[in-house]
Image (spheres, rainbow, N blue to C red):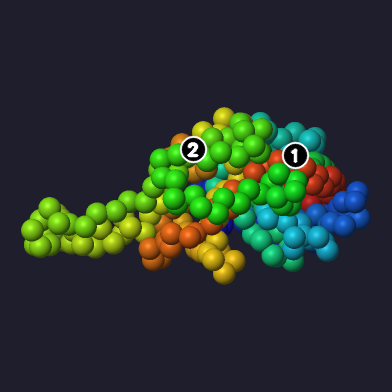
Amino acid sequence: MKATILVVPLAAISITVALAGSARAATNDFDVTVESVTDTRSTGNMMPRCIVQLRISGDEVADALEVHDIRITSAMDDSGHDLRLEQDRNRMQHRYPMMQPNMAQLSHPVELAGPSRSAHAIKTLEGEVELLFPTPDNGGMIIIKDFMKHSGEQINDPMLKKSDVRITFLGRDSGDGNQYGGVVPLSANGVSHAARVRAMGRRLQFSVDDPDHRLVDLAFIDAYGRQVQAWNQGGPMDSTTRTYMFQSEPPSNLQLYIYLAAPDAIKMIPFKIENIELP
């Protein structure tokens, strides 16, 4: 379940791959480098932005579930202009899950203020990447095996309680059309009631209360240990009600995997990149 990377409508866009500037993380297990830069400096743009796409690679990256967050502590162009935005700007991108499991490298955008018109490079970009490595032992992964038998009940787990996360499985949408006496009516847009019923049977709905934004995502695993693809139809991850749509009706023995941003599941990767060429 991946999210679409932020796309900003621009009056003028140019993208280059920044060849200069890379950072070796302090752990010596990760590299943080610049993949591309999008600069939106334009006289027709009231709020110019600079998007730096960071690439995280290393021996352990394939074990990470996602880039959970990127915090920028210093960002300055070569004219001395501070490019940092308020911290929540980049965190909000994470509300749409960007899970990229089993990848040799991960990629994540960082949004900065637009450089000054005279700037030719980002002199310094410094911060920390948070990689998520959730397991049952570190509190980042909770496995619920029989959740579909408990429709309408809040999921009871000590790690959820510790994280101040409350999740209730509301049930699956269903319907049989018997109220129509065997006649299948059409809706105004020509979709049959039977088709709507089939679609509802493929949806599972949850209520989520997550005031500290600790919930990363939900995943669904079948009896053979394979992930079952589902799409969150409830909007961003801040939504209190989430509806997951499946390609076919989910089996009753489906397992629920809950991923949390538990402190022990997060690995901090410091980086400092210098002299990033601007388009």
- As rendered, which of 150 and 71 lies closer to the eye? 150
Residue at image coords 70%, 65%: 103
Please, what secondary structure does the residue beneath circle 2 have? Answer: strand
The residue pinned by badge 1 equals: 263
Relative to residue 120, is residue 182 depicted above or below?
below
Residue 167: tell me if it is visible: yes
Which tag, 1 or 2, sits closer to the chain's start?
2
Q: Would residue 105 be found to the left or right of residue 232 on screen?
A: right
Q: Tell me what residue is drawn at x 72 percent, y 52 percent.
A: 135
Compared with 110, 203 (above or below) is below
Report the amino acid beneath label 2. Gln
* Left or right position of 91 against 149: right
User: Looking at the figure, which quarter contains the N terminus?
Assistant: bottom right
The residue identified by callout 2 is 154
Nearer to us in this view, 29 or 205: 205
Q: Quadrant of the C terminus?
A: bottom right
Q: Nearer the viewer, residue 113 or 147?
A: 147
State if disc 2 and disc 1 touch (CB < 8 Å): no
Residue drawn at (54%, 66%), measured in percent from left and top? 223
Report the residue that reaches farthest toward the bottom.
Answer: 224
Q: Amino acid at mark 1?
A: Pro
Which quadrant of the structure image shows residue 198? Answer: bottom left
Horizontal and vertical percent for residue 186?
Answer: 13, 59
Q: On screen, 236 above or below 174?
A: above
Q: Position of residue 188 (x, y in %)?
A: 14, 54
Residue 261: percent from the left, percent from the top?
A: 68, 42
Q: Secondary structure at mark 1?
A: helix
Q: Residues within 10 Å of mark 1 (few under 14, many from 20)?
A: some
The answer to whether residue 76 is left or right of residue 176 is right
Q: State which mark lies toward you, 1 or 2.
A: 2
Residue 125 lies in what quarter of the image? top right
